[in-house]
Image (cartoon, grey):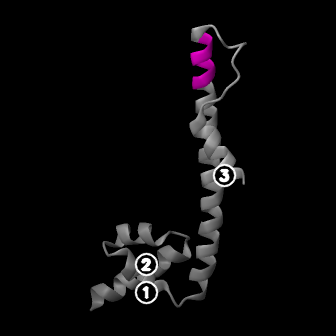
Amino acid sequence: MVRSEEIVKQALTFRKRGLTYTEIATFCGVHESTVARRCKGNRFSKQVTKDNAAREVKDNAMRVSLMQKACQADWIGNRFELGTIETQNEPCGSCCLISSVASS
């Protein structure tokens, strides 16, 4: 029983620091649903959830931006090798599709 109380205390400390349930579960060696159940009633957990969601949106936007830059560099490199850089201005469909979905 003492081990269980230590895990709960450790999980709550991690949650206050802003870690996700998945990260806490990995560190504590328990299932994610156990962590969620133990943290559920705490006020700070609601704020951490909001903060994590906002951080996730920001991180996803950064990933999409990096994918677009890599795709553009690859596209320009391919066009340059083919000697058609001035004549074709069509980006690839994958990252441009992602950017149009992400921006809408």
Q: Which mark is residue 11?
A: 2
Q: Nearer the viewer, residue 47 or 81?
A: 81
Circles 3 and 1: CB atoms closer than 8 Å? no
Q: Residue at x 64, y 33 (%)?
A: 69
Disc marking residue 26? none
Amino acid on which the number 2 mark rests in the picture: Ala
Read off the residue under disc 1: 38
Determine whether 104 is above or below 99 in the image.
Answer: below
Q: Is residue 2 above or below residue 17?
A: below
| Residue 37 x %, y % | 43, 86
| Magenta region, residue range | 74-80
Q: Position of residue 60 (x, y in %)?
A: 60, 53
Mark 3 / mark 2, whichever is N-terminal: 2
| Among the two numbered marks 1 and 2 on one chain, the one whose residue lies closer to the N terminus | 2
**Residue 75 lies in magenta, yes or no?**
yes
Residue 101 vs residue 42: left or right?
right
Residue position for label 3: 102
Residue located 38% across and 79% down the image: 33
Which is more N-terminal, label 1 or label 3? 1
- Location of residue 10 (image quadrant): bottom left
